[in-house]
Image (cartoon, grey):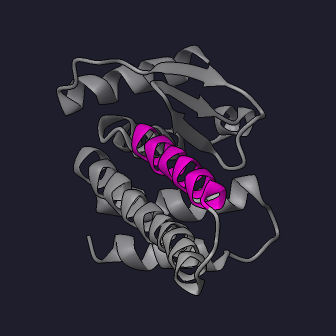
Amino acid sequence: MRDVSLILESLIRQAGMHKHPRLVVTRFCSGAGLSILGTILIHPKVLSMPESVQRYVLAHELGHFRHRDSWKMFLSWFSLVVGSTVLWAIPKTHAFSWVFMLVWESVFVFGLGSYRSRQERRANQFAARLIGRDAVLDGIRAVAGYMWPGKPLSKERVNRLKEAEEL
């Protein structure tokens, strides 16, 4: 854990950041890392990865932290829940109110997916500025191999690779 903390401190200095996220190692993240509300969570498997891959994971998550992506997603989901609750509470006397409610929820569901994609691209761009484009490409490939050995790259990972190649 100490080595990973030192890598994170180095990346923070390199990026010229003044706010420091907390670093927690936990099995409660579905991938290699997760940036959430001022904390970077990394999976224990990251500790056994080569330093170059650890640098990619941390640089990528630091990009999410820097851009406050978890707060933006939280606010988006919160407004979806509140808006949907209000719309459900309104009596549906006209077909228009049902259509409006479905449009509201559809905009959020499809919009959040697209927004999440942009967040991932921006986090990889941030990581590329810190560690270089080739290190980002190698990191994306390596993370999949370490986290899900023997499984082919998911469609999402393939898309991330294609986007990273354009950096």
Magenta span covers which residues? 71-90
Residue 24 visible in rendering: yes
Q: Residue at x 29, y 26 (%)?
A: 12
Where 5 sits versus 89, above or below? above
Q: Hey, which residue is sitting farthest front in the picture?
A: 93
In this rendering, would 66 be left or right of 86?
Answer: left
Which quarter of the figure is the N terminus placed in? Answer: top right
In this rendering, would 157 be left or right of 44?
Answer: left
**Residue 42: % across, % down:** 62, 34
**Residue 82: % across, % down:** 55, 47
Q: Residue at x 42, y 37 (%)?
A: 71
Residue 50 visible in rendering: no
Which quarter of the figure is the C terminus placed in? Answer: bottom left
**Residue 44: % across, % down:** 73, 32
Callout count = 0
**Residue 99: % across, % down:** 55, 82
Magenta span has 84?
A: yes
Q: Residue at x 44, y 71 (%)?
A: 114
